[in-house]
Amino acid sequence: MGHALNQSLAGWSVQALADAAARMESLRGDVLRAPEELRSLIAVTHASLMSATGVAAFTYVVILLLVGIGVEWLYWTYAYSPLREIQSTVPASSRQALRLALRRLVLRVSGLLIFTIAAIGASAAFSWPSGVQELVVAAALLLLVLRLGWILIVTVLAPARPRRRLVPVADESAGWLAAAAIAVVGLLALGAFVAGVMEGVGGAAHTAGALRLVTVTGAALLLVITAFLFFGRPRGAPRFPRSFVLALLVVAVYGIWLMSAKAATLAAIVAAVIALQIGLRDMVFFFLQGDDDRVLPSIVLSAARFAVVLAALGIGAVVVDTPVLALAAAESPGLRLVLRLLGVATLVLLTHVVWITVRTAIDQRLARIRPASPHAEPDEHSRLLTLLPLLRVTAAVLLMVMLVLSSLWALGIEITPVLAGAGVVGLALGFGAQALVRDVIAGVFYLAEDAFRIGEYIEAGGNSKGTVERITLRTVALRHHNGPLHFVPYGALGTVRNTSRDWVVEKFNLPLPIDTDSEKIRKLIKKVGEEMKADPEIGPLLMETLKGKLYRVDPGVKVFRCKFRTAPGRQFDVRAQAYKRIEAALKKMEVRFADGRLPVLTNA
């Protein structure tokens, strides 16, 4: 099979080289014979125009132009008022400029089509000499292309009115770029229509070939100069500047045209797609530059790239007159492989659009709710901060699996055995990696039950404790209060004690001498609690004020139990303030802490 493939490729290469050599020889013959043939064509044309038939034909052409102009003038008597209103509106944004430009474009193109249809339609009312009607139709189409190109270029570039411009082009470059674009359109239109008339009506095939060579060469040279003059290095400083890439595309298309005109058409479509893909980002963000939300520009950019590729495929099929249904039923293995690869490429682009949409939406949401400091207290968004990264990873894995399976199906590979094999492999992995499966399943239930979130302090049954910093599919990262970061598998967590939810009751003991008046101490603690509640810094942290009572009596010591309720994580600051204020109040009462076995602080 490999030997046959090599022979096929070698035969195709030899045939391609032979066709290219024949094409170059044909162009050389056209250039050499064109002058003599052109002189003969001019002489015949002059004689025809001086004859009675020529004068009649010229009169008919003038009448057709007057008919077209009159019908278009009638159209503008009704359409000029809305056009003037649109032109007098100054757009406030790029998107408004686009809407106004589309409305202007519809009005102007409608007038142009009315002129062309009226002129070509009126030509059927006259009896034309042989070949003259084809000449009239070609002239009308040439005029249509030139006017349409002018309308589109002026609408997009708007040289004199930068507020109406639809592309990110500098003011000083817009006029020259518009002139270059009009010149390229004019050259290509001349090469297409005038050369066609010379070849079909005048029988001057060599002159037509030479004219095509001159116009295509001039258009390519003008495009290369334009690329280097007006398109510089894009943001990000790639290896090659943008102008070099665009010029290389033009040269490649021109080189292919010298070898094969039909292949050059497809090459031009591919080059246009590449050029659009290079500039699409700047154009999309130019229209959406006022959006603070970055989700929409990213989605529009991905959708635009996808639409450009699909449009190029459709245009290419139309240009080469491809029978799509016949291709789908073709028996050629190579052709069917190409069609299937196109299907896979479509799936990849569609998946990319979906992934960009999901990822950008999640990233945008995370950017809005993520705290300024990684050590900030958990808030109402901590649940989203915990789940959204996992959702992003899950979406990526799911889209990738779906893309692989869909691509295999598009390539004609039966995916049922693949799914069955994946099930067997998954079962084997499940038996061989029970700890991994246990960790993943335990993590699913921990997250579903909302046992902990990013930023909360937890204590696990396996002596693991710390602030939750990161959550993955298998482990949770806990930052110990002394600094170390512990990665604990979900299966090893066991019972989880979450100290960061809702509220915390903090208790501490005060050992005082046995002869202390218990009621006075209770009132002292209550007064300290009221002062703390009234404090503008400490008060908002207290959910229940500080209280105290006699807890127990030991030999020589009275132990008073104090408690308060506060927000999670703030009990340490509140307790330090309570100690400080109670100590100062006891000094005023000349009461000292008891000396004995009990420490000042005993948690319970």
Image (cartoon, rainbow, N blue to C red):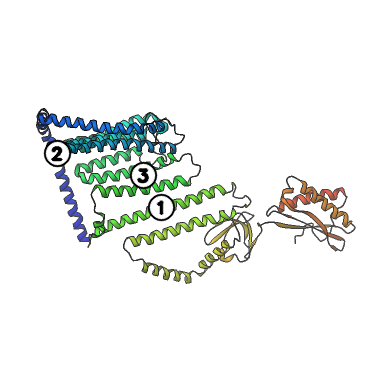
Frontmost of labels 2 and 1 is 2
Q: Residue at x 64, y 54 (%)?
A: 482
**N-term-proximal mark, 1 vs 3:** 3
**Secondary structure under the numbered disc 1 in the rendered image:** helix
Q: Image quadrant for the N terminus?
A: bottom left
Question: What residue type is disc 3 on?
Answer: Gln
Choose between 404 and 161: the one closer to the eye: 161
User: According to the image, label 2 marks what residue?
Assistant: 199
User: According to the image, label 1 marks what residue?
Assistant: 352
Q: How many marks?
A: 3
Residue 436 at x, y = what percent? 51, 66
User: According to the image, label 3 marks what residue?
Assistant: 277
**Badge 3 local density, few (<14 within 10 Å), some, or many (20+)?**
some
**Secondary structure under the numbered disc 3 in the rendered image:** helix
In the image: residue 168, left or right of residue 540 = left
Q: CA distance from mark 3 to mark 2?
A: 37 Å
In the image: residue 75, left or right of residue 42 = right
- Residue 257 to residue 500: above or below: above
Residue 490 at x, y = what percent? 56, 64
Residue 41 at x, y = what percent? 11, 32
Q: Residue at x 20, y 55 (%)?
A: 9
Q: CA distance from mark 2 to mark 1?
A: 48 Å
**Secondary structure under the numbered disc 2 in the rendered image:** helix
Question: What residue type is disc 1 on?
Answer: His
